[in-house]
Image (tube, rainbow, N blue to C red):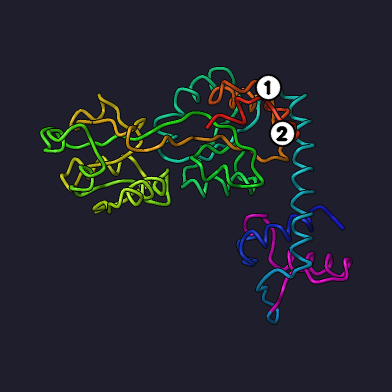
């Protein structure tokens, strides 16, 4: 059994049995991958993949177990490399962050600026996506750190640290009749065409539940995963906008007025997630602390080891 064979079977599975994509990503040939997988299966005396002729069509039950163990072995090999890097290049390396648009646009810049000032030799990569995509990237090892709302905290493979809580506001163009009908109520919002986050995104399902419990159905005319898209269409007069309060900037959004809606909805929490089995470089600890300063280095280490830490972590929300 060889390390590259484990890499091959994992990459093929990751690419949905697409041998061509796997070969491209691994910078090798399809025939080479096929041969090595065959040799591994012969050595193990079992089939890892289901086949239709020569074409791979799925993973066998025994193959699923092999893949889980192979992925774990490859992660441990990567952790060994990271330990080496930590002691030989303490302040150099890479940090890949997966996050949502709202976090990337409105919450991360200050932390990123501070981090780059402290670690100029660490290369930062930021990937944007939905909370589910963010969680998947961290769980698969494509990203070191993920920042998103509650969805990310439901993944068993991830250890999540609550960073901060946020709520919502309603925006509309200057002079909109909404602002003559205050204090703001759910009934008021439901009377107007509404532009908001997709109900699978950024706490949208929570908003849907609040309206449902009140016996109301909001007139949602457009949904988006990007706060700036919501603001664009509100500016066009297509409706009022319901979005995260951190996404409203009085200077940048000077064409819009805002009213707080936090009394109508329970707060949402943004989490920072890492793999439970990850080895964190020293600079990764510092990045976590920039976004969640309530957790010191020792608290993060304890959490990674599965040791219960103080009530701040357990009772944040």
Residue at point 28%, 30% (across, down): 260
Task: Please state if 307 lies on the left or on the right of 287 as rendered.
Answer: right
Report the front residue among 115 and 188: 188
Residue 304, which numbered label?
2
Task: Give the x, y percent position of residue 246.
Answer: 36, 30
Magenta part, dominant SS: helix
Name which of mark 1 and mark 2 comes first in the sequence: 1
Q: What residue would you read off at disc 1?
A: 297
Q: Where is the N terminus found, in terms of image quarters?
A: bottom right
The part of the image, by quadrant, that contains residue 7 is bottom right
* Bounds of the magenta segment: 23-51
Q: Residue 269: x percent and y percent? A: 48, 35
- Mark 1 neighbour density, 10 Å: few (under 14) some (14–19) many (20 or more): few
Q: Tell me the residue at 68%/66% (across/down).
A: 30
Spot occupied by residue 254 in the image (x, y as percentages of width and height): 20, 28
Is 26 contained in the magenta span?
A: yes
Magenta-drawn stretch contains 15: no
Would residue 10 be found to the left or right of residue 107 on screen? right
């Amino acid at each position: 059994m060889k390390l590259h064979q484990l890499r091959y079977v994992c990459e093929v599975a990751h690419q949905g049995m697409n041998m061509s994509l796997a070969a491209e990503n691994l910078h090798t040939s399809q025939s080479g991958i096929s041969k090595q997988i065959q040799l591994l299966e012969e050595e193990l005396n079992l089939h890892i993949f289901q086949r239709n002729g020569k074409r791979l069509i799925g993973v066998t039950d025994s193959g699923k177990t092999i893949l889980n163990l192979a992925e774990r072995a490859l992660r441990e090999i990567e952790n060994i490399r990271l330990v080496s890097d930590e002691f030989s290049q303490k302040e150099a390396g890479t940090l890949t962050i997966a996050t949502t648009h709202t976090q990337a646009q409105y919450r991360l810049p200050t932390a990123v600026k501070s981090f780059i000032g402290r670690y100029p030799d660490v290369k930062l990569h930021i990937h944007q996506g939905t909370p589910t995509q963010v969680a998947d990237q961290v769980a698969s090892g494509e990203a070191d750190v993920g920042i998103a709302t509650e969805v990310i905290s439901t993944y068993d493979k991830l250890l999540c640290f609550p960073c901060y809580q946020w709520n919502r506001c309603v925006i509309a163009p200057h002079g909109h009749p909404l602002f003559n009908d205050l204090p703001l109520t759910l009934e008021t919002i439901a009377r107007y065409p509404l532009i908001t986050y997709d109900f699978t995104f950024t706490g949208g399902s929570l908003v849907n539940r609040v309206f449902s419990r009140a016996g109301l159905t909001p007139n949602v005319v457009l949904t988006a995963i990007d706060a700036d898209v919501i603001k664009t269409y509100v500016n066009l007069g297509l409706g009022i906008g319901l979005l995260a309060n951190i996404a409203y900037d009085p200077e940048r959004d000077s064409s819009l007025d805002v009213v707080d809606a936090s009394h109508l909805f329970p707060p949402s929490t943004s989490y920072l997630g890492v793999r439970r089995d990850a080895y964190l470089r020293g600079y990764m600890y510092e990045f976590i602390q920039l976004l969640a300063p309530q957790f010191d280095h020792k608290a993060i280490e304890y959490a990674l080891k599965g040791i219960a830490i103080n009530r701040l972590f357990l009772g944040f929300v």
